[in-house]
Amino acid sequence: MVLPAREYLSGAAFTDGIGFDGSSVRGFKSIEESDMIFMPDAKTLAIMPWVTDEAQKSAIILGDALEAFGGKEPSVADPRGYVAKRAVKMAKDMGYTGIFAPELEHFVFTSIDPTKLTWDLWVSPKGGEGDSWGAPRVVPESNEIKPGGFILRPKEAYYRTPPEDTTVDYRNEASQVLEDYFGLTIEKHHHEVATVGQVEIDYKYGELVETADRAMYFKFVCKNIAKKHGLIATFMPKPIYLDNASGMHVHSSLWKGKENVMYDGKDEYAELSQIGRYYVGGILAHAKALTAVCCPTVSSYKRLVPGFEAPIYVMWSRRNRSSLARIPLYYKGAGFAAQKRVEYRGVDPSCNPYLAFSCIIAAGLDGIKKKIDPGNPVDEDVYKLSKAKRRELGIKELPTTLKAALDEMEGDEVIKETLGSHVFDAHIELKTNDWNQYCLYVSPWEIMKYLDC
């Protein structure tokens, strides 16, 4: 909603909140109980610098959804105020603070027309580069290689530099705005692996709710700065056929005061403590159900396939990017204890970060409570292992469809308790509806493939 500044400057918005229609927000309220209160969080207020008209200067603010009629408790429908803050308390009750850092990969396109999807054997969509060539794929529209243009071959665009990479100006400005106006500390940015305009901008870690807030602002800023550059930023997991998709690898660690309890210098394998191993064990034990929350779209499961750097096998390792849970191993020694963490790779940027982070930490904490052994690490490229070898090692697979993930989620009590029954039931209902719509839709690929039957 948009309010005049006086509503905030008066102070009433921060004490009484602002009424809104909860029945118009998917998954919140039914029409007969639609009145709700938005309680803004002053710490999240940020100016939108791309609004340059002084008469129209605007700011954005995040907050919690409360029940109406005098209620001060967060609504059970609220991912931020209810789910995420309960997850923070769950960790605190066990003596821990969860620290998170997501890597939000995304694409920037020059144009996409969903009404003109075609089967094109030779060309890729118009992406940030505008001059890329790709393999056979269903694409938004044809893209000619311009005179003097450069070719970025499929799966070969990682860390490419200008002039091949033409997304640098977009990334620089988005990074500057995120730092100067939205409070993020940008650590690095670069072009990603996929041929057409796939990028990544990484920001510094923080506590669960704070980091989820930043993920929301990250997407908001990127979409608006892209628009300013004549581009379209999309966090859809798999917009390009036969090229890499966008993930949101989530790094997490547990702290007691100033001590990272995941670090143990005596562990020769990865300097990972026993608590850290149990945390990994919990994540792996709940991985199939986690996928329904962390990868919540039909498109998500077109990413979770072999050969595109996305994890599909439930196992852990150090350094190994074919593992679902990875222990980064760039440095060694007590001087780098603060960096000891688990990177959970089974997440993509279409997820709700409040829900995803909450379920990840809850799964890890369940592993600690139950002392779940993650099993032996696998230090081989699991994609190259035979089916028999994977079976021998006890390596299971993630769900391959949204429907299968939802079925796993329905039987997971830890995920249900973390989300609360309202969000849990609403998520399954809404995502099942998405799946049913997808199953009924006749795609251009089907016409191309079966029209001659």
Image (cartoon, helix red, strand yellow):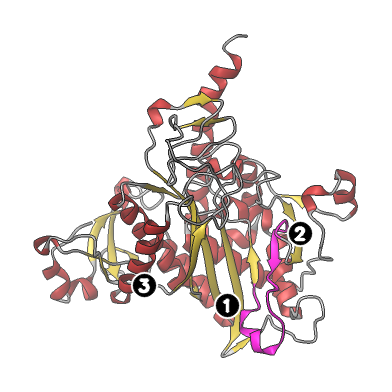
The part of the image, by quadrant, that contains residue 303 is: top right
Would you place residue 414 above or below residue 428 in this image?
A: below
Q: Which residue is mark 1?
A: 91
Q: Amino acid at mark 3?
A: Glu
Mark 3 or mark 2, which has the lower sequence index?
A: 3
Q: Amino acid at mark 2?
A: Met
Q: Quadrant of the C terminus?
A: top right
Q: Are marks 3 and 1 in contact (CB under 8 Å)?
A: no
Say which residue appears at 53% left-offset and 70% top-offset: 101
Cα–Cα span, label 3 and label 1: 29 Å
Frontmost of labels 3 and 1 is: 3
How crowded pointer 3 is (Cα within 10 Å; few <14, some 14-19, many 20+) is rated as some
How crowded pointer 2 is (Cα within 10 Å; few <14, some 14-19, many 20+) is rated as many
Secondary structure of the residue carrying tag 2 is loop
Q: Residue furthest left?
A: 55
The part of the image, by quadrant, that contains residue 367 is: bottom right
- Is residue 420 rendered to the left or right of residue 303? left
Mark 2 or mark 1, which has the lower sequence index?
A: 1
**Residue 333 colored in magenta in the image:** yes
Q: Which residue is mark 3?
A: 179
Q: Which segment is the magenta one?
A: 321-341
Q: Residue furthest top?
A: 453
- The answer to whether residue 53 of the structure is visible from this angle is yes
Q: Quadrant of the N terminus?
A: bottom left
Q: Amino acid at mark 1?
A: Ala
Q: Position of residue 246 (x, y in %)?
A: 54, 51
Q: Which residue is mark 2?
A: 315
Q: Are marks 3 and 2 in contact (CB under 8 Å)?
A: no
Say which residue appears at 28% left-offset and 75% top-offset: 42
